[in-house]
Amino acid sequence: MASTAGTAPVTTAPASDDSSRRRGLTGYVLLVPGVVWLALFFVIPFYSLVATSLYDPGGSVFSGYEMSYQFSNYWHAIQDYWEPLLRSLWYAGLATLICLVLGYVLAYAIAFKAGRWKNLMLVLVIAPFFTSFLVRTLSWKLILADGGLIVNSLQAVHLLGPDGRLLATPFAVICGIVYNFLPFMVLPLFASIDKIDHRLIEASSDLYANPFVGFWKVTWPLSLPGVVSGTLLTFIPAAGDYINAQLLGSPNQRMVGNVIQNLFTQANDYPAAGALSMILMILIVAMVLFYVRRAGTEELL
Amino acid sequence: MSSSADVAQERRAPARASFDGLRLENLTKSFGAFTAVDDLDLDVPRGSFFALLGPSGCGKTTTLRMVAGLETPTSGGITLAGQDITYAKPYKRPVNTVFQNYALFPHLDIYENVAFGLKRRKAGNVDAQVKEMLSLVELDSQTRKRPAQLSGGQQQRVALARALINKPEVLLLDEPLGALDLKLRRNMQIELKRIQTEVGLTFIHVTHDQEEAMTMADTVAVMNAGVIEQMGAPEELYENPRTTFVANFLGQSNLIEGTIKGRSGDLVTVDMHGIDVSVPAARSHADGDKGWIGIRPEKVLIGDPGEQLDAPGNSVPGGVVSDVSFVGVSTQYLVRMPWGQELQVFAQNTGHRRIYRSGEQVDLSWRPDYAFLLDASQDARAGAQEGTD
Ligand SMILES: Nc1ncnc2c1ncn2[C@@H]1O[C@H](COP(=O)(O)OP(=O)(O)OP(=O)(O)O)[C@@H](O)[C@H]1O
Ligand SMILES: [Mg+2]
């Protein structure tokens, strides 16, 4: 009874003409709500975003915009905002990595070591969602505040200079992102690790793999589906996040999400905001495709 | 079990230091209040093919897991070639296992599964060795398939190849042939035996299948409820069982109640429901004055009442045939005896004797050398159900 990793080939049973046609129709009927939903809330907004990003930047919200296929909007957005763009990817990447390490250890412990506490621990992982994202991020502001317990203690042991601070630093922003997105990493990792047959790990140790090698050759590859979905679920929203940078950072930690939000709501520069949104999206899609390809082939090796 | 402890004692005394095989001493494993393996003593000589036979749940897998290092003994010790490995890490033991559930790595293809152990030990010439091993188990055309794409029997052969390729000092086989069809099973039995003799490895083979155990192994140990009931060469176990469990689990036995009348020289005389029968003293394992007289069904001769059967031995008159089944090479009778018990008789269809019909009067007889005597304190039906299915 070997457990199967990856995807199993889907086979369709041959059916008589009549029933297969009916089944086909049923399939389309079942698709309708989803298609309507996607059309309303994805295709139309997406179309309007693409359109906005190509408007003539000379217009304004009050005088209206002209569609002039201004591809230069993209170029200008990159020129003006490459810094927050790169910073977003960097912060999100780093936070994802930290989440992966913390989340893997946690998920592994819950799956293999928690015994009868497993369900309780899973509930505790999800428990932060019971309060609002904003409230939790604000409480980090208190935790890291100047004159707070942590800053004072770090100053006392001279890890932080006398006027050193944690708030308004990249450290605070990344801490916030890691904290907020950790459950998105832990849950898929747990689902993958929990499925691993413990007897496979025993077999690896029977075949001369010490625990370290056994982990890299058996546990890690078998948990890759969870690693891939966990990192995607963490990285994608983290790259577009603006709450953490806004509440825990300073203008020096501005991420692309902050810029887009600012362009849309304060500066009212819709074309630039649209172009920047598109750039972020294209970047993420490209990186994700590349990553999934790589991870997919790695799993096959 | 006093008898098995005696055997182990005898064996251990002379060769304490020089024994270079696998030795289990007073090995015990408890899961909470339940004792899965109970004070087990076992010596497996180096290079032998050792079969561990027993009903489901008797502790075979647990014993192997302790030898492999996957389970820590509650007490007792394990030594291999004079070295204490009781608490050695599994990856440091020169022991490999063919797992009952295969435990193949699902993310690796067949080739990588088989190469796993060699690569971990940084062995040279991996490619050639893997190819050779895969052709030995007739899987050379499937090397790039994943385990999930193989049939149960093919998976089992991969598991075998994956363990065997490491040429461990002791190879543990936990029912490695269970999923194979009869023909492949016979082939693999021969192949396994050949490999074992060729490389001279110690094999410990766990099986439910008594025939497999007896044809393959040099030594068979019959295990029941966490203890070894009896251990020895297959013929010895079959011909001279020491307990009712072994008598019933290995093949079939007729066990008839009797009262011991006397022991003189190398014969024990037993009163069997009014008939005096004798049993060689070497085959008597009863201490009290009561005992079970045991005789294998194929050793019992059947004849017309009053007929002088060719065996000049214990003759038992007054039977009535109650059931006949013709199975080709032999005919199997159930014969009801005057004291109400039904005895099994297997008669070879040599053509010399006629086949009796149900209801006919018959006499039974057997040579005293074939009978054995077991202690009356045991359950006469122990091991009977498990052995026959
Ligand atoms: N981890 C465990 N925890 C509790 N009990 C266990 C554990 N492992 C085995 N046992 C018990 O120990 C007994 C022996 O189990 P074991 O697996 O050794 O049997 P087995 O002889 O290999 O049987 P089978 O022929 O069915 O494989 C069983 O009653 C089983 O329930
Ligand atoms: Mg078992």
Image (cartoon, grey):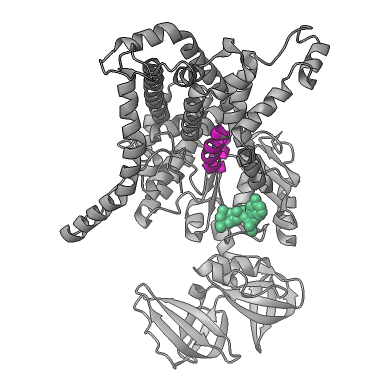
Range of residues picked out in magenta: A184-210
Q: In this view, which residue lies farthest toward the left?
A: A17
The residue shown at (36%, 44%) is B150
**Where is residue B124 shown, x and y percent of the image?**
46, 20
The residue shown at (65%, 65%) is B242
Q: Quadrant of residue B247?
A: bottom right
The residue shown at (44%, 93%) is B360
Q: Is residue A45 above or below residue A124?
A: above
* Pick the front one: B229 or B184: B184
Q: Is residue B354 above or below residue B156?
A: below
Q: Locate residue B226 relative to residue B168 in the image: left or right.
A: right
**Where is residue B115 shown, x and y percent of the image?**
45, 30
Rendered-image quadrant of the N terminus of chain B:
bottom right
Examine the structure image and report whether residue B128 is included in the region drawn in magenta.
no
**Where is residue B202 shown, x and y percent of the image?**
56, 41
Q: Is residue A210 visible?
A: no
* Pick the front one: B130 or A147: A147
